[in-house]
Amino acid sequence: MPQPLSDGAQRLVFGILVVALVALGIYLSVAGLRGEEEPEQQQGQASGDTAGSDEAQQPEPAAPSPIPTTDAADMSVMDWFPFSEEDFQAAATVAQRFGAAYGTIDYTQSPEAYYDSLAAFTTADYARTVEQSSGAGALWGEMAEQEAVAAGRANVESVRHFDDESIVFVVRTQSIVEGGDSAASDLGDFAVTMVRERGEWRVFDFQPAEAGNLGDGG
């Protein structure tokens, strides 16, 4: 029969086993950490390689191409305006007709008939205030007694201002009176602002030219 180990020998063997187990645990832990780090390092290297490859594959920016230019002889001036030549002509025609209507007054009729003749050329909003824009009412009683009739004339002198929505013309107006004390009266220059309403050019504002109307049709 084998002889049992003494107490001292048993303690020595137990201590050796404990030390061996601790060393084995440490070894396994370190080996596991290294195993986790290696894939991450490999992935990082692969990502770096890909980024470097993408940078290498990016095309160089193309040089800007020269813009086309137009010779002076080929320039079309009307292309630079927000309206066509036909639009300017159509708006000017209405402005001129309104100026003529402003100077055309039959004092044998009612003032309302005169204001209605002006409103035929204006926007819906301005038609409600056109009476205040005309000074004809102040002399209506006196001129009606004389049964005076005035024929208006008007002429577009210039374009004062325009934008994407409106055009302002300077219109010279005259009123030739028959049956009154004077034969003709120059009414002066007026700034007539034209805007589009329901597809037609309409008078948006009308005031003496020296008032500096810039025609904000917004």
Image (cartoon, rainbow, N blue to C red):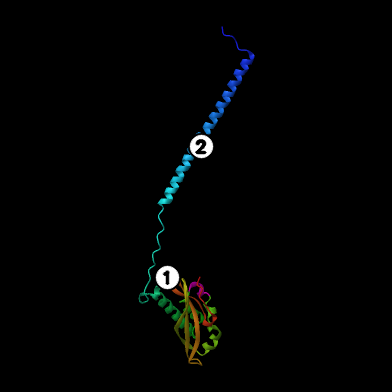
Relative vertical location of residue 80 with respect to residue 187 in this rendering, above or below: above
Could you say which disc has been placed on residue 208 in the image?
none
Mark 2 element type: helix
Q: What's the residue at 58%, 26% (across, down)? A: 22
Q: Which residue is mark 2?
A: 37
Q: Residue furthest left?
A: 74
Residue 175 in the image, given as x and y percentages of width and height: 48, 87
Magenta stretch, main secondary structure class: helix
Kind of residue at disc 1: Gly
Q: Is residue 125 magenta?
A: yes
Residue 8 in the image, given as x and y percentages of width and height: 64, 15
The residues bearing labels 1 and 2 have C-alpha atoms spaced at a distance of 76 Å
Q: Is residue 212 magenta?
A: no
Q: Nearer the viewer, residue 44 or 117?
A: 44
Residue segment shown in magenta:
123-128
Of the 4 image quadrants, the one containing the N terminus is top right
Q: Nearer the viewer, residue 60 or 66?
A: 60
Q: What's the residue at 54%, 32% (across, down)? A: 30
Mark 1 element type: loop
Q: Which residue is mark 1?
A: 199
